[in-house]
Image (cartoon, coloured by chain):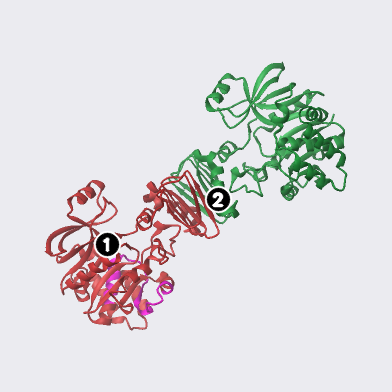
Chain colours: A red, B green
């Protein structure tokens, strides 16, 4: 059976301000050493397994032109434009309807547009195992073997081993506190929930039918109107009504037959500026330096200067994130990364045009 | 007898990079709440005592156009252009020759173009006392009553009182170490050397004759050639030969009859970015904020954004100096202010065009 990929690319991502902006979120910027943006890297990674024609991007329609520009080799018909952002469950339902219409049935690989994966070969190996184990009534998720105590991710509790390197999922768990995260880390019995899944399209349709009847109604209306000349407004009215809910909450936490493949491929959800430390290489003073920077007696910083004709000179600075992009400059203590939303709110009040 | 003022404005001042540049040093920029530059403030301050026609600016010829532009009310004939920077003694000799030629004799008030004075009325009172006490064979200097333990200034040891509020100078002392500076501060017997002096022009000429014969030769050649059509090249050849030396070293440390007037007028030599804290008012979090800044959970910083169309957002930053000016950005720990020359050297090696 054919394998198709859904890349979810609707995220808003204010957390990478000032490089990401409300009309230009994280998935469309470069945060690694590569010049490719996060979404370009996401597509490049799976090209060995999935043909361009079978790669679908789901994004908010406001990002339409950015996607067209960044992924010119993906046909416009494969770029599914959501009129509103209603979290991941409606996004999956939309894609499920489109895939059903086009392929009747297929194996589906669900990926995010804004994650980092260090070792692409190991990642593809995991997907390969996943594809081989898709049945007509299971869901397979890619779990990540924790490499640190991390409170920023959801977790998956491992159940019994199904076979070599595939386990049943006991349960999905929300982001834990530090003590719990440490227990998880020490026990070796928990994986990070990467949000990457594999399933048969027809099975996901059945799950949606069983667990979220409203969403199933929407799926059918989309399916029946894909070739309707009024499709855009039909879609809009469906999205207007549908509840915003995550696929984890709507489906994953309710389905019994979920398997997980533990992965060690250096996955990162790139959730904050701090994660850039895991994506790029530091100098001898543990500084990550991009662009024109003079750095003296300064350690443990992230220094990103995107302005080619400008110079940043840093003296005696520690543990700080400095990002110059277009007309904005962020200077943030690493320990305050989690407060960036507060900063964005402050900017909104007074300098909205810079967001 | 008429009083004329010499404002020495030849300083290079890399210490205020990136606002001051090698072709635009400190005396020509604004560092206070006022929009006036340091040299404009210096002239404004003494206008009540000295007429525009009697104010002389001595500067390097490379700053000619800046001075013309910033001080349009000072006639070009009063702007003395040094072909080379040879410290303060040649500068004084040049001015002494010009004043002798124009006035025969006069009381001379020597000031710096780049100092800050908080209380102008008290300052003018001190000058007034100074002028009243100039004789044909003394030098009067304005000393500053220390308000903190300071290792960045030279000191004057007080001798016996001559009369109310005027003392003989025991000696001039170079910048002390911290322990010595603390002794000076505690003893109450030392003043800061402000570098501001009063004397009769004819007496300075005699001092130069007596203590620095080479400089006296130059003074005479200048005096005899002021109206020579080749004056510029004559001056140049004199400056080529003359030794670079300070007026303190060449004259002050050798003259016996020096008096000092202790001043309390809030003087500051504005020697580093840190001194901006003494020139401007802080907000409730002890931040000095200029321009478009969003400041969150940040204390004890100096935040200067000169770019009107740019935003700086600061989060969790302490004790830091941030200056955005044109195409340069400085981010410096306050504790590292004294290392800024090292930083400038680093910039020189790689990004000279930004200096």
Q: Write down the residue under mark 1.
A: A265
Residue B237 picture location, percent across and down = 79, 44
Helix, strand or loop at mark 2 = helix
User: Disc 1 is attached to a residue of which chain?
Assistant: A
- Looking at this view, is B264 or B328 the one in front? B328
In the image, is residue B140 part of the stretch drawn in magenta?
no
Which residues fall within the magenta stretch? A68-97
Q: Residues within 10 Å of mark 1 (few under 14, many from 20)?
A: some
Marks 1/2 same chain: no
User: Residue at position x 60%, y 51% from top?
Assistant: B355
Instruction: Name the image quarter holding the N terminus of chain B.
Output: top right
Q: Give the side of residue A223 with respect to residue A292, left or right.
A: left
Q: Write down the residue under mark 2.
A: B347
Residue A164 picture location, percent across and down = 14, 65
Q: Give the side of residue B182 with respect to residue B8, left or right.
A: left
Helix, strand or loop at mark 1 = loop
Q: Give the side of residue B176 with respect to residue A42, left or right.
A: right
């Amino acid at each position: 059976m054919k394998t198709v990929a859904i890349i979810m690319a609707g995220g808003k991502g204010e957390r990478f301000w000032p490089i990401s902006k409300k009309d230009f979120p994280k998935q469309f910027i470069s945060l690694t050493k590569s010049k490719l943006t996060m979404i370009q890297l996401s597509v490049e990674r799976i090209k060995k397994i999935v043909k361009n024609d079978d790669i679908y991007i789901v994004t908010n329609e406001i990002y339409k032109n950015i996607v067209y520009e960044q992924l010119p080799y993906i046909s416009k018909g494969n770029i599914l434009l959501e009129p509103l952002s209603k979290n991941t469950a409606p996004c999956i339902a939309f894609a499920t309807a489109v895939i059903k219409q086009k392929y009747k049935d297929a194996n589906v690989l669900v990926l995010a547009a804004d994650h980092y994966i260090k070792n692409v070969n190991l990642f593809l190996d995991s997907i390969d195992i996943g594809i081989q184990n898709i049945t007509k009534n299971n869901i397979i998720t890619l779990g990540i073997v924790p490499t640190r105590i991390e409170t920023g991710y959801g977790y998956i509790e491992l159940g019994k081993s199904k076979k070599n390197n595939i386990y049943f999922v006991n349960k999905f768990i929300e982001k834990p506190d530090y003590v719990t995260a440490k227990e998880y880390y020490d026990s070796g019995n928990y994986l990070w929930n990467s949000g990457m899944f594999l399933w048969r399209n027809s099975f996901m349709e059945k799950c949606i039918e069983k667990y979220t009847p409203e969403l199933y109604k929407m799926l059918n209306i989309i399916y029946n109107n894909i070739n309707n000349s009024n499709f855009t407004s039909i879609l809009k009215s469906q999205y207007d009504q549908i509840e915003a809910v995550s696929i984890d909450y709507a489906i994953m936490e309710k389905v019994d037959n979920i398997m997980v493949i533990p992965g060690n491929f250096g996955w990162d959800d790139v959730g904050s500026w701090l994660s850039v430390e895991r994506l790029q290489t530091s100098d001898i003073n543990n500084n990550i330096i991009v662009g024109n920077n003079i750095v003296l007696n300064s350690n443990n910083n992230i220094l990103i200067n995107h302005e080619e004709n400008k110079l940043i000179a840093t003296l005696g600075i520690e543990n700080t994130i400095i990002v110059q992009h277009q007309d904005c400059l962020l200077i943030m203590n690493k320990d305050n990364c989690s407060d960036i939303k507060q900063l964005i709110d402050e900017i909104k009040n007074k300098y909205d045009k810079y967001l």
